[in-house]
């Protein structure tokens, strides 16, 4: 994989990107196709990333994080996703799962749990969606009732990335009345009695990333695992998703870059009518459009990340980024299959896997239709 030309803010950031690239090329890319074919979850890979300091890059050093700006963290995600999306997206989901504790937890809670999360010993999952409340997250029904000092939770959370594999689960649950103000956030350990992961979903792509429903049957969670204040859960969830959308954006650019790399390599080697197909103007223009779209998508997510790093509002830009980057990944991976022709449609080449993986990125962490709603409302003040 040829390196992408990047502008990084420090020598430390350059070293981190080099480390991520080395791990991606040596540890991820050689294993991705085989483990995807077996739907095998790469738990040891996440431990390796944790030991390398790549699972807590966006968090403070006082609890074992990397203390890096978001623009650096996202470029690490891009490099990981370029080699294996299940790992890149898993890193993004884990980072998202650490956010409620890091941003809203008490000092005691952070001291107790955050170091192992950021170090990779504890892998996280984020439980917001339900079977009947996906885009309309404020309509969730999973209920937590106070019994003594504990919360007792009943319901089910759907589409949970790392479901059945995670060591901790952020549960968005209803502790009060209807609507957003009745939602709270609980941090549940995987061995909580009554917390029962179901069988993983059988998906089109990204099969190494397990997605499952979490059934909650009288799950008893200690009161000291409430993150933030009671009724603050929806605010926690939404503020986490702004950063999460940038994570998905970076993952999408990684997949698009991988598809572009594959298409360019193939076009330079494949000959028809006595010349490389890369030398036909129609195909070279297609490659040029793909490359331009990838560069534009990368610039957009980095622009939004720099707003975040400067403490400025970035929610609409995160939505624009998620929308544009994932739509770009879908276009570029589709074109990559076309460049490879019949070979693009068979599993011997990775292009078909990139196409299947790109599709989910238009759906997760808010569909692209929801992103358009967010952007539209920011323009009109709705």
Image (tube, helix red, strand yellow):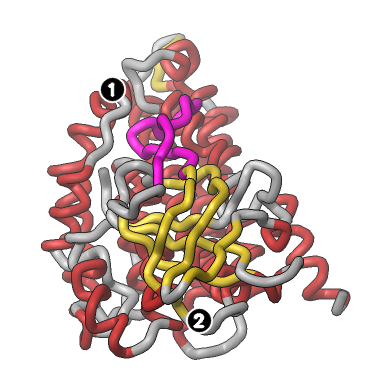
Q: Decide: few, some or many residues near mark 1? Use Cα within 10 Å; few <14, some 14-19, many ≥20.
A: few
Q: Is residue 69 magenta?
A: no
Q: Is residue 12 left or right of residue 149?
A: left
Frontmost residue, 163 versus 362: 163
Frontmost residue, 83 versus 165: 165
Q: Is residue 206 magenta?
A: yes
Question: Where is mark 2, residue-wise?
Answer: 308
Quadrant containing the C terminus in the rendered view: bottom right
Question: Where is mark 1, residue-wise?
Answer: 38
Q: Is residue 170 visible?
A: yes
User: Secondary structure of the magenta portion, mostly?
Assistant: loop
| Residue at (64% x, 64% y) in the render | 319
- In magenta, the rendered stretch is 195-214
The image shows residue 279 at horizontal and vertical percentages of 46, 28
Numbered tag placed on residue 191 in the rendering: none
Q: Is residue 4 visible?
A: no
Task: Compute the Cα span from label 1 to label 2.
Answer: 38 Å
């Amino acid at each position: 994989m040829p390196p992408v030309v990047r502008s990084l803010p420090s020598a430390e950031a350059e070293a981190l990107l080099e480390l991520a690239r080395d791990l991606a090329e040596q540890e991820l890319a050689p294993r991705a196709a085989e483990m995807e074919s077996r739907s095998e979850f790469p738990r040891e890979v996440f431990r390796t990333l944790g030991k390398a300091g790549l699972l807590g890059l966006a968090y403070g050093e006082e609890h074992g994080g990397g203390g890096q700006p978001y623009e650096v963290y996202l470029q690490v995600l891009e490099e990981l996703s370029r080699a294996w999306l299940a790992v890149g997206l898993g890193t993004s989901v884990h980072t998202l799962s650490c956010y409620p504790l890091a941003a809203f937890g008490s000092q005691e809670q952070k001291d107790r749990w955050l170091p192992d999360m950021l170090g990779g010993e504890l892998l996280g999952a984020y439980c917001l969606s339900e079977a009947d409340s996906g885009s309309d997250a404020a309509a969730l029904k999973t209920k937590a009732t106070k019994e003594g000092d504990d919360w007792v939770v009943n319901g089910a959370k759907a589409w949970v990335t790392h479901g059945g594999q995670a060591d901790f689960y952020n549960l968005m649950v209803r502790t009060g009345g209807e609507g957003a103000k009745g939602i709270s956030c609980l941090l549940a350990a995987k061995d909580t009695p009554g917390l029962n992961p179901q069988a993983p979903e059988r998906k089109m792509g990204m099969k190494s990333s397990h997605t499952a429903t979490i059934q909650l049957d009288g799950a008893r969670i200690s009161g000291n695992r409430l993150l933030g204040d009671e009724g603050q859960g929806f605010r926690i969830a939404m503020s986490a998703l702004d950063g999460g959308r940038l994570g998905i954006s970076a993952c999408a650019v990684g997949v698009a870059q991988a598809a572009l790399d594959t298409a360019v390599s193939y076009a330079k080697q494949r000959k028809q009518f006595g010349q490389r197909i890369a030398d036909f103007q129609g195909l070279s223009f297609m490659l040029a459009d793909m490359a331009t779209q990838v560069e534009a998508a990368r610039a957009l997510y980095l622009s939004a990340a720099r707003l975040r790093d400067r403490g400025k509002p970035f929610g609409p830009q995160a939505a624009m980024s998620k929308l544009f980057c994932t739509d770009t990944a879908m276009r570029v991976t589709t074109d990559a299959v076309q460049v490879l022709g019949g070979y693009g449609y068979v599993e011997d080449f990775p292009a078909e896997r990139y196409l299947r993986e790109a599709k989910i990125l238009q759906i997760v962490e808010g569909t692209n239709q929801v992103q358009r709603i967010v952007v539209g409302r920011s323009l009109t003040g709705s």
